[in-house]
Amino acid sequence: MSPSPEIFLLKRVKLLGLETDNPLMDPTGARLLAARIKAGVAVGTRIELVADADGPSGLCAGDRGVVDDINELGFVRVIWDRGMVVDIDPDHTHFRPLAA
């Protein structure tokens, strides 16, 4: 004999104290999340430039580094193997993630 439908309506999938869905997301957190998704890499990822970077940074195709931070404007801060720390714009500076 199967339980009545009323029993299923009373059960919850998530426990009340452990819900992960938050209807009141912080605007700054939402911007940071969107920027990280748009960048396509996570903090700690090794990347390699595919083309020379625009501007006075001196970055060249083939330079490698580790993603240190992604700000809410979408700029990716990278600690480069050559010893510099430079923020790059993923819309204008093409890079690829390297295998871990």
Image (spheres, rainbow, N blue to C red):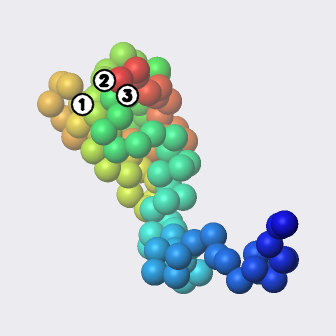
Q: Which three-letter amino acid code belongs to the residue tagged 1?
A: Trp
> Mark 2 or mark 1, which has the lower sequence index?
2
How many residues crowd around disc 2 within 10 Å: few (fewer than 14), some, or many (20 or more)? many
Residue farthest along the top direction in this orientation: 62
Q: Dividing the picture into quarters, in which one does residue 60 lie?
A: top left
Q: Which mark is residue 64?
A: 2
Q: Residue at x 50, y 44 (%)?
A: 39
Q: Residue at x 44, y 27 (%)?
A: 97
Q: Is residue 36 visible?
A: yes
Residue that carries the numbered disc 1 in the rendered image:
80
Q: Are marks 2 and 1 in contact (CB under 8 Å)?
A: yes
Q: Residue 9, image x and y in percent?
A: 77, 80
Marks 1 and 3, Cα distance to the nearest angstrom? 9 Å
Q: Residue 92, image x and y in percent?
A: 52, 38
> Mark 1 or mark 3, which has the lower sequence index?
3
Position of 3 compared to 13: left or right? right
Q: Is residue 57 visible?
A: no
Q: Which three-letter amino acid code belongs to the residue tagged 2?
A: Arg
Q: Are marks 2 and 3 in contact (CB under 8 Å)?
A: yes
Q: Which three-letter amino acid code belongs to the residue tagged 3?
A: Ile
User: Could you tell me which secondary element the residue under label 1 belongs to?
Assistant: strand
